[in-house]
Image (tube, rainbow, N blue to C red):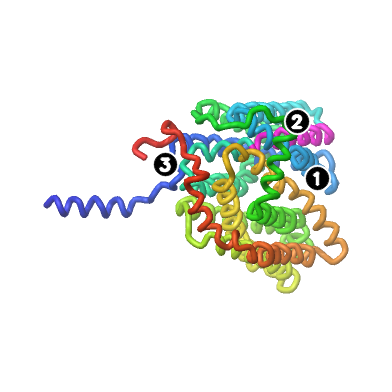
Amino acid sequence: MSATEIADTSKRRILRRPSMPPAFRYAQYRNYWFGMLAAVGGFQVNSFGQLWLVHTLDDSFVVLGYVGLANAVPAIVLNLVGGVVADRFDQRRLIMIAQIGTASLVFLLGLLAVTGVVEVWHVLVIAFFAGAINAFNTPAQMALYPHLVDRKVLMSAVALNSSIWQGTRIIAPAVAGGLIWLLGTSSPFFLAGIGNIIFVLVVMRLNIAKTERAPGKKAFGDLLEGIRYIKGNPIFRILIGMTFFNSFFGMAYVTLMPVFADDILGVGSGGQGLMMSTGGVGALIATIYLAAKGNFKNRGFVLVGGAVMTGLFIAAFALSTDWVGSLPLAMALLFLFGMSTSVYMISIMSSLQMLVPNHLRGRVMGFYGMTWSIMPLGGLYAGVIASLIGAPWAIAIGGLLVSAFAIGPALLNGNVRNIGTILARQSDAVAAPAPQSSRAAGD
């Protein structure tokens, strides 16, 4: 075989070989991702275990809602403070402290459960303190991982992070349910604690370049600086506003899923599980695609179009359950909803990460994270509206509001439409390259 033929054969083999997602080419990010997988998997298992435990202690639906509120309220109140702390202190150490604190709480809940002395108020208090810790943990995580990759692959990193949440949302309930069946109600909490400790060990070994910090300012001044930055940048206001609408209105259907599954479609808990899993699969497929692609043209129109379709798909799902009453159709619409939601939320997250200066990253991303913490409040809102006009119209109206915000303020704003061009122009000004030691060998 000639040298030319050998070269051609090698090229064909390379072309057939699946390409690694761009962010995975950075060794430190790979390690961080697997550590986060353990922590997020533990979080999802713990959430399932908490609700199951409360249900065995008190069969009131209202009490189940209290668990979500106990976790959400401190996160909403403290997220901005957590962002300030993330910008003022070592983010790596902050994550480690937060993960150890969370592990201690879930281990405590496991001990209370295994000894048989646990009561509902124990779960609520532990959920409250876990939410408070998470208000500091989330901004620190969002501020840290962009330093593990080059700025040009941030969308890949954001998508890979999102894939953890989507993947564990599908798998964790089955794992938690199996553990409870085999080992009892306390087992998910011990597994969750182990996941937190694994993440601590991974973060401990990361080598992060020091970030410039603004000395001499008081915490309240830092907080106001972050708020003023968002207020003074229309593109940040609109992107965070889109996240708010999605979290409060678009995701409110999750709270009312038992109503759709049992009262409207009559498919019971099994049908509810199928619908939720189908939405998760759609979201996971989209995140994997974006993680492998890394970036795309016309980001602004993809972002706005994804938001519009997200609202329309969830509205169609809600109304079709009442008008058509078909489980397969409901599953198909939730599959498409999951895909479109992932596309536009990953676009928003990666755009914010690429635009925000390093010294403000914790505060801006803390504010962004606060919009996700309001999801339980959106569920309460949907419940109130559903009691007046029915669940299908309550969710459909929320979906249409998501689309309306995208068509209105987002589409009419030139910065959002041309965000791809803006990101390209600001590439040098806001670049956050990874330190040499964080790159994979040969990258």
Give the image quarter of residue 37.
top right
Q: Amino acid at mark 3?
A: Arg
Instruction: Give the residue pinned by disc 1.
Output: 64
Would residue 442 appear left or right of 90 to someone viewing this image? left
Find residue 238 and report its horizontal and vertical position in percent.
67, 56
Residue under the point 72% across and 61% down: 267
Residue under the point 26% across and 52% down: 11
Q: Secondary structure at mark 1?
A: helix
Instruction: Give the residue pinned by disc 3.
Output: 25
Find residue 145 and report its horizontal and vertical position in percent.
54, 38
Between label 2 and label 3, give the one nearer the viewer: 3
Q: Amino acid at mark 2?
A: Ala
Query: Looking at the image, is 212 positioned above or below residue 61?
Result: above
Query: Looking at the image, is 317 positioned above or below residue 440?
Result: below
Pick the front one: 202 or 183: 202
Q: Which range of residues does the magenta coloring cover? A: 119-139
Q: Secondary structure at mark 2?
A: helix
| Residue contact at pointers 1 and 2, CB within 8 angstroms | no
Instruction: Give the residue pinned by disc 2.
Output: 113
Would residue 387 appear left or right of 395 to someone viewing this image? right
Question: Main structural element of the magenta stretch: helix, strand or loop?
Answer: helix
For marks 3 and 1, give the CA distance: 42 Å
Q: Amino acid at mark 1?
A: Leu
Q: Earlier in the sequence, mark 2 or mark 3?
A: 3
Find residue 304 and report its horizontal and vertical position in percent.
61, 63
Q: Earlier in the sequence, mark 3 or mark 1?
A: 3
Give the image quarter of residue 201.
top right
The tag on residue 205 is none
Query: Looking at the image, is 163 positioned above or below residue 415?
Result: above
